[in-house]
Amino acid sequence: MNQTRVGVVGYGTIGKRVVDAIRLQPDLKLTGVSKVRADFESSFITEHGIRLYAVTQEADAAMKSSGISTSGLLKDMLAESDVIIDCTPEGTGAKNKQLYQKVGIKAVFQGGEKPDIAQTSFVSEVNYADSLGKDFVRVVSCNTTGLCRTLSRINEEVGLKKVNAVIVRRAADPNEIKKGPINSLVPNPAKLPSHHAEDVRTILKGLDIFTSAVIAPTTLMHVHVVSAQLERASTKDNILSALSKSRRIRLVDSSMGIDSTASILEFAKDLKRPRNDMPEVVVWSDSVYVKDNEVHYMQAVHQESIVVPENIDAVRAMLKLETDPQKSIDITNQSLLG
Amino acid sequence: MNQTRVGVVGYGTIGKRVVDAIRLQPDLKLTGVSKVRADFESSFITEHGIRLYAVTQEADAAMKSSGISTSGLLKDMLAESDVIIDCTPEGTGAKNKQLYQKVGIKAVFQGGEKPDIAQTSFVSEVNYADSLGKDFVRVVSCNTTGLCRTLSRINEEVGLKKVNAVIVRRAADPNEIKKGPINSLVPNPAKLPSHHAEDVRTILKGLDIFTSAVIAPTTLMHVHVVSAQLERASTKDNILSALSKSRRIRLVDSSMGIDSTASILEFAKDLKRPRNDMPEVVVWSDSVYVKDNEVHYMQAVHQESIVVPENIDAVRAMLKLETDPQKSIDITNQSLLG
């Protein structure tokens, strides 16, 4: 099989998982990783047979003086790749885009970037086809991805008339030691609505949705409390059946002991998932409450891993490696969800 | 003035604050405090001129052997009081009620008890008159009190058609070291709705309200995200004006730096409030979003102190010390809110 060469820019929370995911795909080949800092992750990369590219000459010199051998600069990685997945922090993707345009390479961006960085925003199960052949695609943020996955299923099944979602955000990723709060709840922002509603509408066009967010002192996962008015009356079984059609939605029941974000990730450990990841959005099935045309439910989002499958599918759409969304989704699911 | 003699059973988070509040009222006199354990709080009580009553003979012996002098047993305190405020942990109030009935003394219970322990549940600004002359009254929980205070104002102003509230609960009080979570979000419960909706209806009869709750690892305050459909169209100014009519609702603006539960309590410290308390429910004015007949807002509830004014007012209603609700509320506010 002629493999598509994918370069990854940035090796943070998302980048390192995207790197691992690319290496599991039959049709993709990792060119390498571009990084800016000489640190334990840079040496980890080279020690594990992955080509490391320095973003700048200065970074290259710093890496070499730390005994880390590089395979060249970012521009070299671009030349050796068919597509880039940009996993840099918020705002950096926008700067990098100029570089990608200059050399004429396609790129996937993350949800920290503004929607207009790309020709379309992306959630695999909702609008894969919109990205076919596109040059620049933006995978939406973890919270937006989680909302779109479940809302799109309910929308298909019974139609969404109006949605209200409250997002309890994790304060920091487990590896972040400079962020807070450590003992406070923080409206994020206090001025309503939060930006998530607009971001969801980049995927579910025209949806009447209102979102609010509060940051809580935890590192594991986000939790969403979703309420919606439906176009027509439904039942709990109906909603659960709609949600269970996606392998990227995992239904759990608190009565079986999966009663918190902590126990969800304990379960991920038991599944022997790499890095204890849970790329599925996790819906508590016992939280699903339906009365006539009203539904309420609670779900949890693993911010470190939920967008990884989307990044892989976006590449397949942009390169037209698969024109049938479900074919790409199935390959990705098989490799990441087992 | 002939002062009404009030005995307090239990000296935990609520009890100690109720004790302090009683001592600030011109028409009330603290008989003393009944406690079960010989600990630093027992000796603190006696060292500060408050009469300590042991719940049982055993407790009395334990206190005396710890060098703490008591003024007798709980039954003695009941005999010397006109009314009891029971601040014992959830479920204990129900057991104590039998004792109060036996000796024929009126009692206020806390929100941890089931509604049927009392003849009515109580939130001062909503249903004070229902408690006039009653023998047993239940002050509702901190979350329910916070919801009722703001919802009742909006209901009076423009009418509430339907309410959805998401409660982000603090995991433990600052003094509690055996409760969690310390790094997880916990649906509480996962099975929706949470009990708060029903509890709100003990005060705002017949209100169409749905509630969900998630526990977060923080000790300071709860945060509520409230959404409601109104009977008629309103404006942000209209809602803010309705809320500002109550001194038990404090409006803050995140743009002035009061942007989290931590900064609310920092502000309470600056106000030199005893124990850094904030008995008002705190509404972020910039969170108030109104569009046509829909309102959204965020508020914070200081679980340690919000129900203290209600406990005082309940006594005045039950003993008919004030038959005009606002008169009692004003006296209490003056003493506690400055």
Image (cartoon, coloured by chain):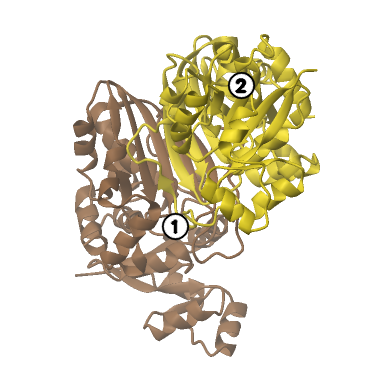
Chain colours: A brown, B yellow
Q: Which residue is mark 1?
A: A220
Three-letter code for the amino acid on which mark 2 is drawn: Ala
Can residue A219 be seen? yes
Please tell me whether residue B240 is drawn above or below residue A84 in the rendered image: above
Instruction: State the CA–CA distance, disc 2 to disc 1.
Output: 43 Å
Q: What SS does tag 1 mark? A: loop
Please tell me whether residue A311 is drawn above or below residue A38 in the rendered image: above
- Quadrant of the image for the N terminus of chain B? top right
Do the residues marked 2 and 1 share a common chain? no
Left or right of B297, for residue A322: left
The circle on residue B314 is 2
Label 2: few (<14), some (14–19) or many (≥20) C-alpha neighbours in 10 Å = many
Residue A255 at x, y percent in the picture:
27, 46
Three-letter code for the amino acid on which mark 1 is drawn: Leu
- Quadrant of the image for the C terminus of chain B? top right
Identify the residue at image location x=24%, y=66%: A27
Please tell me whether residue A11 is drawn above or below residue A128 in the rendered image: below
Q: What SS does tag 2 mark? A: helix
Q: Are marks 2 and 1 in contact (CB under 8 Å)?
A: no
